[in-house]
Amino acid sequence: MKKLLLKTTFGLLLSGPFITTVNAQVGVGTLTPDASAQLDVTSETRGVLVSRMTSAQRIAIASPADGLLVYDTDTKGFWYHKAGTGWTQINNATLSLPYIANENNAGTLFSIANQSDGTSLEGVNNSTTSSISAVRGIITSTAPGGFATAVRGINSGTGGLGVGVWGSQEGSGWGVYGSTPSGLGVYGNATAAGYGVYANSNTGTGLNATSTNGIAANISIVNNSNNNNVLNVSSVGNGAVVNVTTTGIGAGVRSATNGGFGVHGITAEQTSAGIVGDNNGAGEAIVGRTTSDIAGAIVGRNDGGGYGVRGFVATSTSGSAIGVYGQVGINSSTGRAGRFENYNADNTGNTLEVETNGKGNVDNTQGNAASFLVDNASSRAAALRAEVNTTLNNFGAAGVFGVSSGTGGFAGLFHASNSGGNGPALVAIADGNGNGITANAGIGGNGVEATADGTGNAIYAWTPAISNGKAAQFANFNTANTNPVLTAETHSTGNIALFKSGNPATANVARIDADGKGFFNGGTQNSGADLAEAFDVIKEVSEYEPGDILSIATTKDRTVEKSNGAYSSLVLGVYATKPGVLLTEENIDSNLTGKVPMGVVGVIPTKVCKEGGAILRGDLLVTSSIPGVAMKADPDKVKAGQIIGKALQNFDDDQVGKINVFVNVK
């Protein structure tokens, strides 16, 4: 900021604001001029207006005093006269070179903002001398604070195209060069998901590190809580991602770890492999050695669509080649030839998958995806033992899970092939509360299909004498599924269903014949308390509710509407809340859309009011003047066909309510 001292003599004829002179100070608009001011002008509605003139008039002032201030109407700015320099515009001060200044200020000392496409600050040096700089930043402290920067480039863009600091070189030199005796020559830090140092090449090498006696490159993570990879190398081309060669006898790649994997191969493609080892002689392609009791000699890992470990027969047609071969028993060893294990409780994938594209043979002895054999006549071992240890019984938690993904075939086939044997082809036992067999059909098939070629039962379910369970139960747990829980079908004139009782169960107690007629020796019992019939209604069903008094509609056949008028002879029944028996002329498959169940006999919650007086138990009820509401009947006014029924509860409320009524219109 520049301080300007205005020295001028005012000869003013003032008639408005007052002028006060105190100890040779002049105050305009104030009685107490500031002690530091020779002239103090105070106003909240007016300013101080200095001389205004054109640039030509300003320049023409003869012998301007040092500090003279005017307003130039051509440049639209204030100008002051400085002895030895001349006229200077206040907002456009010049900078003389070389310029050296020393300030002690925590703020920014020099800032240039460019709102257009040009460069805000550019340094150019045409010297050929070594180690010169076009722009140089120096930190003179020998112990600067952390991340103190001599030159710092900041890009505030949030996109992916900006660059904080850009170094380029047109020849064979270095775009960015850093040098240090023991520190970091070039340091890049990524505070988020970016790159601390980014190397790129169009045709050459993006990054080349060489060393004569030391290590060419050292890459490390010094934070023991950082679980990221130390080095990421990727390629979208068809060449090797990492190509390691050696002309000596050392290892091409040597990896050592205390607790992780010495070599960890990952692939994201189904047709590739995490690790591939080639042997062009007679030896092994990959050999893993371990003396540990818990670690693996070879570990294959896959985080994509390929294979952690893949074994395949590529060219042999002998039929005896093996892709992956695990052996136990060599040198009298014991253990397991192979083991597959899933440690992730949330992993719903298969721990082991075996697949074949072969056609197999008729008796399924060859060509199978997998074949298990116990070749010992005295053995009690299972050819295949599958076990699942879980507290859940959801889909997929199974000891054996068979899938048929084609349009034919079976997800599971169990065959007792010995015609002289009496053992079942399949035995399912549940020692706990689970199901012995659970079957599910995902689309239009049947969960369980059983056939009987002889005279036996297709399905025979029974509970032994020691059991307290049920031989069968059918349930639908999907509230949106409106299909029947059980469908029984017959293509003959025999009964659809037959129920027996007794011990032994020799007496027929109920049956349903082929026409759908039911026969019950002991009669029937229903939970509802009334007999109702489905009727169409005037207007929308949504305008009706249980308890409404219903009368014969006068505008449409076989239709009802809310009662309208006291002592109506058209009254027919009450909108039933829970009918015990619902009669209808519709087929049994109809859902009775647009109809309401009208109770005609039985106990039904009914809308009532006090229009005919307080209601006592046993009072006769008729329609009131309120649509759909009943009231106490006056025996002297009742006519034939007006009685709805008898009240089973007292009612003395001022508002419409509901009470139980024995409905019997007569």
Image (cartoon, grey):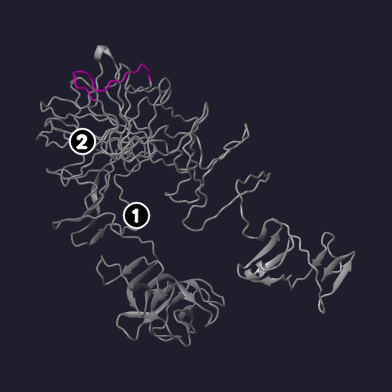
Q: Is residue 607 above or below residue 200?
A: below
Q: Amino acid at mark 1?
A: Asn
Q: Is residue 164 above or below residue 230?
A: below
Residue occupying the point 23% across, 41% down: 403
Camera-side residue: 252 or 358?
252
Occupied quadrant, residue 267: top left
Coordinates of residue 36 in the picture (x, y in percent): 82, 59
Camera-side residue: 255 or 107?
107
CB atoms at circles 2 and 1 under 8 Å apart?
no
Occupied quadrant, residue 203: top left
Q: CA distance from mark 2 to mark 1?
A: 35 Å
Q: In the visual, does 633 lie left or right of 354? A: right
The C terminus appears in which quarter of the rendering?
bottom left
Coordinates of residue 72 in the picture (x, y in percent): 64, 68
Span shown in magenta: 278-293
Camera-side residue: 643 or 23?
23
Circle 1 is placed at which residue position?
478
- Principal secondary structure, stretch drawn in magenta: loop
Q: In the visual, does 607 lie left or right of 244? A: right
Camera-side residue: 39 or 35?
39
Q: In the visual, does 467 lie left or right of 136? A: left
Q: How many marks?
A: 2
Residue 283 counted in the magenta span: yes
Circle 2 is placed at which residue position?
355
Residue occupying the point 70% across, 61% down: 81
**Outermost bottom residue:** 637
